[in-house]
Amino acid sequence: MDPKDRPTRATEAFFGRRRGKTIRPQQAAALESGFQTYRLDLAAAPPAALRTLFAADVSAVQLEIGFGGGEHLLHRATAAPQTGFIGVEPFVNGMAKLMMAVREKPLANLRVHDDDATRLLDWLPPASLDGIDLLYPDPWPKKKHWKRRFVGPVNLDRFAHVLKPGGKFRFASDIDTYVNWTLLHCRAHGAFAWQAQEAADWHRPYDGWPGTRYEAKALREGRRPAYLTFVRT
């Protein structure tokens, strides 16, 4: 697909605030030094092979959109050193937490993007990702805000463009309306096949799932998370 023909959407459409509490000096230092090592430069042309983005010798590349505090991303990147992971998080405090963690324990198979995920998706080469994780995204619960939900026809087009055939899109949420929304949109799109085999599948966490603070909050408040997996056909 020619870049000019790729789907586009307003940059600020899919996420809310960028900052929370004031960044502490040590966090600011971790951000500055960490970005020099891990931050992707989207002003440069994307490489033909994404594995060359990483200091480690990787054989597959995964993307996590909106990694929050980075608990899941750090767990996966540590457990699978031969897989490259790209983490996206525009919320500065979440990115600072991740950069503090990798300052203590560097990861050669990690890169990050601290802006809108759609910019990264439009930068990536076609069929370059083995998987995309969208875990506990902002549900935008009010009907007037549903257009701001990340899952929708335009972004599913982006996913279909950058995922390899057989690549997986994983979606987790504790908000029933967003789970149903995602199922309906993926079915309508046609490029994604839901992988549930039995009724219990979508409430069963992924293999090796470490849990997240968002999930813990949902469970405390009595909401049951759902874990959906779709395969790019």
Image (tube, rainbow, N blue to C red):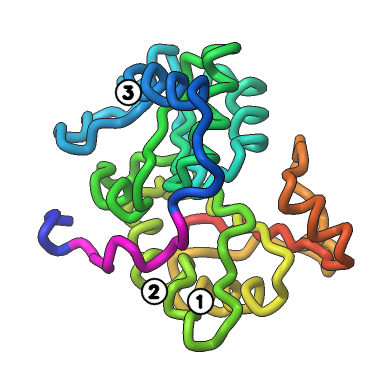
* Tag 3 secondary structure: helix
Query: Which residue corresponds to mark 3?
Result: 53
Few, some or many C-alpha atoms within 10 Å of disc 1 (few <14, some 14-19, many ≥20)?
some
Q: Earlier in the sequence, mark 2 or mark 1?
A: 2
Magenta range is: 6-17
Residue type, numbered disc 3: Leu
Q: Quadrant of the N terminus?
A: bottom left
Q: Nearer the viewer, residue 134 or 37?
A: 37
Q: Nearer the viewer, residue 9 or 32?
A: 32
Query: Which residue corresponds to mark 1?
Result: 185
**Residue 83: percent from the left, percent from the top?**
51, 25
Looking at the image, residue 194 sits to the left or right of residue 165; the answer is right
Looking at the image, residue 158 sits to the left or right of residue 211; the answer is left
Question: How far apart in space, not on screen, are marks 1 and 3 (Cα)?
Answer: 32 Å
Query: Which residue corresponds to mark 2?
Result: 153
Question: How far apart in space, not on screen, are marks 3 and 2 (Cα)?
Answer: 29 Å
Q: Nearer the viewer, residue 64 or 29?
A: 29
**Residue 179: percent from the left, percent from the top?**
65, 71
Asked whether residue 68 appears in the rendered view, the answer is yes
* Tag 1 secondary structure: helix
Identify the image quadrant of residue 35: top left
Q: Earlier in the sequence, mark 3 or mark 2?
A: 3
Residue 52 vertical placement versus 180 (above, below) = above
Looking at the image, residue 36 sits to the left or right of residue 216; the answer is left
Residue 162 colored magenta?
Answer: no
Taking the spot 15% from the left edge, 32% from the top edge, the residue there is: 44
* Tag 2 secondary structure: helix
Taking the spot 71% from the left edge, 58% from the top edge, the residue there is: 227
Taking the spot 32% from the left edge, 23% from the top edge, the residue there is: 53
**Residue 2: percent from the left, percent from the top?**
12, 55
Residue type, numbered disc 1: His
